[in-house]
Image (cartoon, grey):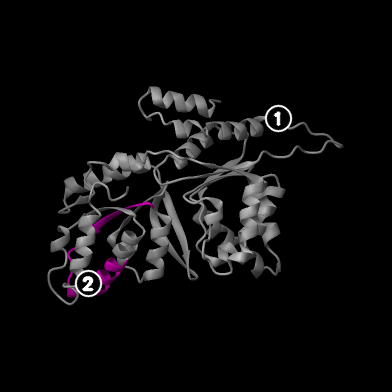
Amino acid sequence: MTDLTTLYAQKIKQGDLARDPAQEAVLDEFERIGSALATPVKRGFFRKAPEPPKGLYLWGGVGRGKSMLMDMFVKTLGADIPHRRVHFHAFMQEIHGALHQARKKGVTDPIAPVAANVAKSVRLLAFDEMQINDITDAMIVGRLFAALFDAGVVVVTTSNREPDELYESGLNRALFLPFINLIKNRMEVRELASPTDHRQNRLAGSRVYFSPINPQTRVDIRSVWEDLSGGSAEPLTLHVLGRDVVIPAFRNGVARATFFDLCGQPLGPADYLTIASAVKVLVLEDIPELSRTNFNEAKRFVTLVDALYEAHVQLIASAAARPEMLYIEGEGSFEFERTASRLREMQSADWGA
């Protein structure tokens, strides 16, 4: 089994990575956890199981390589260490589903058995993008993770926020504060304080708006997606006001969807705000020409762009026309000028900085 430090050095030597001292400074935390998990556990009737290693909460700005390091670490784990890598939103969606099924069976307090079921299958959970936006998540994560930790599960997670900023200004936040203390007690908190936004560097000088839509622009935007996602992705389900919003492809903060996926469906501001908080880059394909014939879709697109703009999400898009020519006639075309201006600004080289 190759350790993370060796794998990291190999990728630098091969030219796949650029050396980053801030990334190298946190490798020891992953090595600590990997070494502890790989150590055989001596069992006996009177022998108490050893305490599991403390987990890792790795936070920092977008594009610093947090998810990349976590993914590399997961790849170094042997098959004898049961583990799972999952986006935090997706995991919490699964938990809510399991809690609902348990309640249907008459279980009055289902958190403990649901957590126990998770703990049966893994020794390590690796979460990408831990953030709490939903009050239903905020009210259960404390007890859920306390049960996971008590069952010996080790948690490694990335986040754009330091623990004290989680669920900031959220409803009934006082009830959430014990979870922050739990993180600090059961996980090492490290900041990945790199001055380099590696993701932005990869996009620097690259086109982010492809028009018109033709076979070549489809190839070009697919190439950008594969470069940012590594060619591997899975759907991401977001829980919004009791409904599911599905992004067809997601990996390491980069999402891919079509115009129809996000604007051809009856979505609203809350949905788009949740999407904007969950992704750092959105590859949005097949934006059509807009007019009175697809007025509802156009309104949703305006709301989506506003949410992405305010959250400073990097938008990579393919469209039937350049921004100023997307919506040239019909009700709302005048107001669309603001959206076109934002689309232009979001194409600037320093937009994601």
Report the residue marked by disc 2.
294
Q: With 145 as the anchor, is 216 left or right in this view?
A: left
Residue type pointed to by label 2: Asn
In the image: residue 66, left or right of residue 340: right
Along the line of sight, the residue nearer the viewer: 349 or 245: 349
> In which quarter of the view is residue 14 placed?
top left
The residue stretch that appears in magenta: 280-303
Q: Which residue is mark 1?
A: 40
Tell me the SS state at disc 2.
helix
Mark 1 packing: few (<14 Cα in 10 Å), some, or many (20+)? few
Q: Position of residue 114 (x, y in %)?
A: 66, 57
Q: Nearer the viewer, residue 224 or 338?
A: 338
Q: Position of residue 107 (x, y in %)?
A: 70, 67
Expressed as whole percent of the image width and height from the top left, the position of residue 27 reads: 52, 32
Quadrant of the snapshot with the N terminus: top right
Question: Is 8 contained in the magenta span?
Answer: no
Does residue 159 appear to the left or right of 214 in the view shown? right
Left or right of 89 on screen, residue 216: left
Q: Residue at x 48, y 30 (%)?
A: 24
Which amino acid, by three-letter code, is at mark 1? Pro
Inter-mark Cα distance, 2 to 1: 62 Å
Neighbor class of circle 2 (other Cα within 10 Å; few <14, some 14-19, many 20+) is few
Residue that appears at 68% across and 68% down: 105
